Amino acid sequence: MDRPLSHPYDLHCHSTASDGSLSPCELVRRAASNGVRYLALTDHDTMAGIEAASRAAVHAGIRLIPGVEISVSWNKKCFHIIGLDVDPHNHTLLTGLADLQRLRMERAECIANSLEKHNIHGALEAVREMAGDGMITRTHFARFLVARDYATSVAGVFDRYLVRGKPGYVATQWAELEDALDWIQAAGGMAILAHPLRYQLTASWLRRFLTAFQSAGGTGIEIVSGNSTPQQIATCADYARRYGLLGSVGSDFHDPAFTWVDLGRLSPLPAGVTPVWSRLEMH
Ligand code: AMP
Ligand code: MN
Ligand code: MN
Ligand code: MN
């Protein structure tokens, strides 16, 4: 699919602080060389990479927008809410994330136990080693399973493991939607629904969620993601207009080996949608 080589904004990506494979510094350098001028680092439930990324951004001559991708449970379904342009030192937000970080550690043990029951050994040690100081995510388990030849790709793992009804699946009660939005607001940021079409929801559940999100103070939704089709972009733009939400663009970049997604390689926001960056203070 034809996409412009670079979009000046990329407001969703991951570093080694969660399940990305590049360090915050390497990520910023890659973004800058791809032509990105405003990059939001949005690791899963942590802001540990922000400081290093900010320093690297000064050197690279681009603007780093502090962010975080918060795991939320709503009606037993998991959603990802981006806190964009948050204060990385805000106590309320840091305290909220600390709970999720504990939950991730506990969940990792449960996932490893489940895999043990299916005769897959050594997962916990392996993912701890891989994640280092960063968050342990299912991506780490997926990389472990690929390394052990249980699947040929990370995406392939999610067909047979780590998802509902399969080995390594653990149901998790993440943050409440209202709490996550409160933390983001306390930190002076905007709440953006990440990748609205990736939750495998019916249209009516998605509409129900958008109603709740909008009335709880949500600001925007991602309209353009790293591998969005023109049809998906049109659908999300329609949701933005219908629910009075601003539009965001973010690659959700994790790894240079996933060649179908890259930093800044994003289609433009469709006309008639107000971009989230109209609300960003540009210094
Ligand atoms: P977690 O937040 O620990 O449950 O892990 C979720 C992460 O797993 C997502 O952010 C993706 O990076 C990755 N993931 C989930 N589903 C898939 C999939 N079908 N293909 C590739 N990566 C996936
Ligand atoms: Mn991820
Ligand atoms: Mn996500
Ligand atoms: Mn993400």
Image (tube, helix red, strand yellow):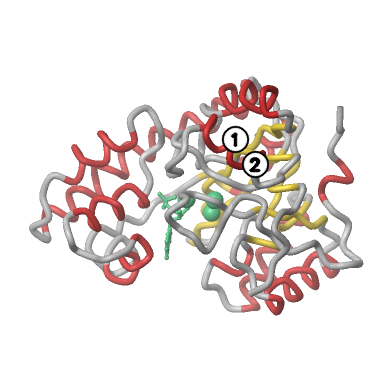
Residue 133 placement (x, y as % from top left): 37, 27
Residue corresponding to mark 1:
29
Q: Answer whether residue 223 is visible to the viewer in this image.
A: no
Residue 20 placement (x, y as % from top left): 46, 43
Identify the residue at image location x=83%, y=45%. 277
Q: Could you tell me the amino acid type at mark 1?
A: Arg
Rendered view: 256 above or below 129: below
Q: Quadrant of residue 242?
A: bottom right
Rendered view: 78 above or below 270: above
The residue lying toward the viewer, choosing from 52 and 238, is 52
Image quarter (top left, top right, bottom left or bottom right) of the N terminus: bottom right
Identify the residue at image location x=55%, y=73%. 201
Mark 1 residue element: helix
Q: Are marks 2 and 1 in contact (CB under 8 Å)?
A: yes
Identify the residue at image location x=47%, y=33%. 23
Identify the residue at image location x=69%, y=66%. 3
Does residue 151 appear left or right of residue 15 in this picture? left
Residue corresponding to mark 2:
33
